[in-house]
């Protein structure tokens, strides 16, 4: 068996849903698109995305002699219905379980240890949403999936409900085959986005996106009224453009790591509970949860905006 096949088998054993390999190249084409996105101010207040553009383009500035980008996909989908109860705020599926940064980082470390058995002198850098990396573009280049019109990478095996992990190494592996685009003539995600945030295929304007407003926007920023009006009670994130994707409807059965199962079996939280929460309650309630990406003040702003809509 080729070492690459052994590594793939180990990755599945550890709980990854898929793994792809891409040759190192400078991302000239992709970075031009990225710069265009920034020039349009589609990153809203996320100024950190304007930093390290050189590294996003050329990952050999992160790891000398980089040869391969190993991309892992880890499913987080679980079947759960939302009640649409106006007293509750919805949580996006990726944040229902334990914090994926910690879970996947540990899995990546285990995978790297396995690879080191064959390449003891090799060097590695691993990222899970934590570095200046164009993760989606590497996932496409590695053959894990294609970039859908909603901006997410879609795998033919597991749809788009997965975390993308990146391992850069100086080992040379045979690359995977870039997958063609299977969106075809479908435009469901663009049509169903309640705030028209998908301004053109694969381009999301964060200024209009519920996910940005409920997770990334600092607590002192007021959610615009038109976003609040259009938001069907998402309190942390928004899954609509993934829920409507036909590829996700077909491929919702992938195995999920127990770490990503919904904590307390809940996918919605009582809005009053959030408003009455103290900092101490918040620290206990969301310990090791991805929800801690947002401060308590942000969750309370989000909860208030949903309740305000109800009163109108
Ligand atoms: S996450 Fe929600 S608001 Fe953002 S683009 Fe998708 S459907 Fe639109
Ligand atoms: S909803 Fe349709 S257009 Fe949008 S990502 Fe899925 S397949 Fe592509």
Image (cartoon, grey):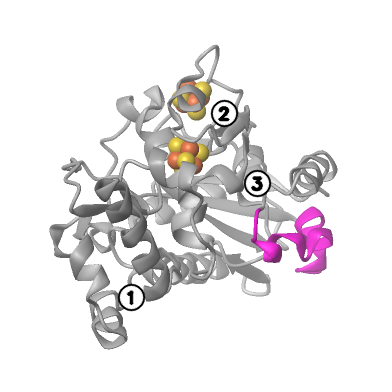
Mark 2, residues whose alpha carbon is within 10 Å: few (<14), some, or many (≥20)?
many
Query: SS at mark 3?
Result: helix
Q: Quadrant of residue 161?
A: top left
Q: Which mark is residue 138?
A: 3
> Which badge, 1 or 2, comes first in the chain's sequence?
2
The residue drawn where x is 78% and y is 65% is 52
Query: SS at mark 2?
Result: loop
The residue that disc 2 covers is 149
Mark 3, residues whose alpha carbon is within 10 Å: few (<14), some, or many (≥20)?
many
The residue drawn where x is 55% and y is 49% is 4
Callout 2: CB less than 8 Å from ligand 2: yes
Quarter the C terminus occupies: top left
Horizontal relation, residue 53 to residue 114: left or right: right
Q: Is residue 267 visible?
A: no
Residue 283 screen position, x and y as percent: 30, 83
Q: Which residues are magenta?
A: 44-65
The residue that disc 1 covers is 288
Q: Quadrant of residue 301?
A: bottom left
């Amino acid at each position: 068996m080729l070492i690459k096949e052994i590594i793939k088998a180990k990755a599945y054993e550890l709980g990854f849903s898929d793994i792809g390999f891409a040759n190192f190249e400078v991302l000239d084409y992709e970075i031009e698109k990225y710069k265009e996105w920034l020039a349009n101010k589609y990153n809203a207040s996320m100024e950190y995305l304007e930093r390290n553009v050189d590294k996003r383009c050329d990952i050999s500035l992160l790891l000398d002699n980089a040869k391969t980008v190993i991309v892992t996909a880890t499913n987080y989908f679980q079947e759960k219905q939302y009640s649409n109860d106006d007293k509750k705020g919805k949580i996006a599926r990726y944040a229902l379980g334990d914090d994926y940064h910690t879970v996947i980082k540990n899995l990546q470390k285990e995978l790297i240890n396995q690879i080191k058995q064959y390449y003891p002198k090799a060097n590695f850098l691993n990222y899970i949403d934590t570095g200046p990396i164009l993760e989606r573009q590497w996932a496409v280049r590695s053959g894990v999936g294609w970039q859908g019109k909603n901006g997410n990478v879609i795998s033919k095996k597991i749809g788009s409900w997965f975390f993308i992990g990146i391992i850069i190494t100086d080992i040379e592996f045979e690359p995977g085959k870039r997958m063609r685009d299977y969106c075809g003539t479908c435009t469901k995600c663009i049509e169903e986005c309640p705030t028209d945030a998908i301004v053109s295929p694969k381009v999301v304007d964060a200024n209009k996106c519920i996910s940005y407003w409920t997770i990334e926007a600092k607590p002192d920023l007021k959610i615009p009224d038109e976003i609040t009006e259009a938001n069907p009670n998402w309190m942390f994130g928004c899954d609509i453009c993934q829920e409507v994707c036909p590829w996700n409807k077909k491929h919702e059965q992938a195995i999920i790591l127990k770490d990503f199962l919904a904590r307390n079996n809940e996918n919605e939280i009582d809005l009053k509970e959030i408003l009455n929460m103290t900092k101490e309650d918040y620290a206990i309630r969301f310990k090791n949860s991805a929800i801690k990406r947002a401060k308590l003040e942000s969750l309370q702003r989000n909860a208030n905006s949903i309740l305000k809509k109800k009163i109108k």
